[in-house]
Image: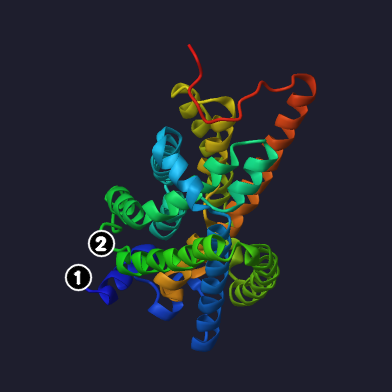
Amino acid sequence: MNVTEVYKGITNIYNGGNFSANESMGFPKISTRLNMAINIISIVILSITMISLGCKMEISKIRTHFLKPKGVAIAILAQFGIMPLTAFGLAKGLQMDPIKSVTVLICGCCPGGSLSNIFSLAIKGDMNLSIVMTTCSSIAALGLMPLLLYIFCQGFTGLENAVPYVGIITVLVYTLVPCAIGIAINHFKPNYTPFILKAGVSILIISSIIVFALSAAVVKDVLWMILMPDALAVSMLLPLIGFTLGYILSIICRLSPQCSRTIAMETGCQNVQLCVAILKVAFPPHVIGPMFLFPLLYITFQCTEALLLAMCFRCYQTFKPPAEDYQCIEVES
């Protein structure tokens, strides 16, 4: 089955064959130039995010956690075990249609995002573990994300051969290049790192505003499709379940409270920039429709819930100061 047949098949599944390709899902026609502009800006946002992530990473920290890999191993298990399975369960339980299901699965199978580093700091987590886990999960996603998508898509009629794996792998490979550049800059020219991080934040904000404005102009008439109850429910439950089960798994594996909090944040916080880039670049606009904006809905709930958890933790600390747990070690029995 070639790519054209795959897209035609998934579009027909969604529409019951009632629409032509350009009218799929009631999605308005989008000019080639505008579509290309949104794609390019999405890639720019992803590149800046990954360069910034690389600039936060130190080779010595990677080496330290590789020598004692238990924390990272549990974190990777939580990231690529809990989130994809939860996404699959929610999509199945809510009986989502194929387009929404594949969108939720891609979001659930994405590696951890850089926002988790910020929230880990807010809950006084292990920052070394947080940054190493984000980096390692981004690298591991190159093999695990396509594999998990293939496995879980078998559970949805019509999605078995309808996911553009080549496009997804291409985007994943691309993410490793800016990340490696960031690591190299931080290792060989560390004095440039603060400037790159500050400039990156400014460019990231401007680029995000532009792509959001362009996307809103395109999907304004069908924006309601990502605000349906099933999409809202997934956006609310997926990060919350990730935070909760990530913490429980860490406690079961007898990691310290500091490491458990870190893994909880890393599990629930997905790389939404990568998710947007995959949905926008790997799928034609008439197939994915407005669902490429689903990650923006997800990140809204993700940040809200993470902030509430951080506030609860800070309030708890005022009444009961935490024990010293500044190393990612097993809890003594």
Q: Residue furthest right?
A: 318
Whether residue 293 is visible here, answered yes or no, is no
- Residue 147 in the image, given as x and y percentages of width and height: 29, 52
Picture layout, residue 205 above or below residue 79 = below
Q: Which residue is mark 1?
A: 1
Give the colouring mode of the picture: rainbow
User: Which residue corresponds to the image point at 39% horizontal and 40% vertical from the top-left?
Assistant: 81
User: Which residue corresponds to the image point at 55% horizontal and 41% vertical from the top-left?
Assistant: 237
Density class for disc 2 (Cα within 10 Å; few <14, some 14-19, many ≥20) is some
- Residue 326 in the image, given as x and y percentages of width and height: 61, 30
- Residue 155 in the image, given as x and y percentages of width and height: 29, 47
Picture layout, residue 78 above or below residue 271 = above
Which mark is drawn over residue 156?
none
Query: Which image quadrant for residue 193?
Result: bottom right
Query: On the rendered structure, is 234 left or right of 203?
Result: left
Q: Nearer the viewer, residue 170 or 176?
A: 176
Query: Which image quadrant for residue 236?
Result: top right
Q: Which residue is mark 2?
A: 161
Amino acid bearing label 2: Asn
- Residue 64 in the image, given as x and y percentages of width and height: 46, 41
CA gap between label 1 and label 2 equals: 8 Å
Tell me the quarter of the image containing the N terminus.
bottom left
User: Which residue corresponds to the image point at 40% horizontal and 38% vertical from the top-left?
Assistant: 67
Q: Residue furthest top?
A: 333
Amino acid bearing label 1: Met
Q: Are marks 1 and 2 in contact (CB under 8 Å)?
A: yes
Q: Secondary structure at mark 1?
A: loop
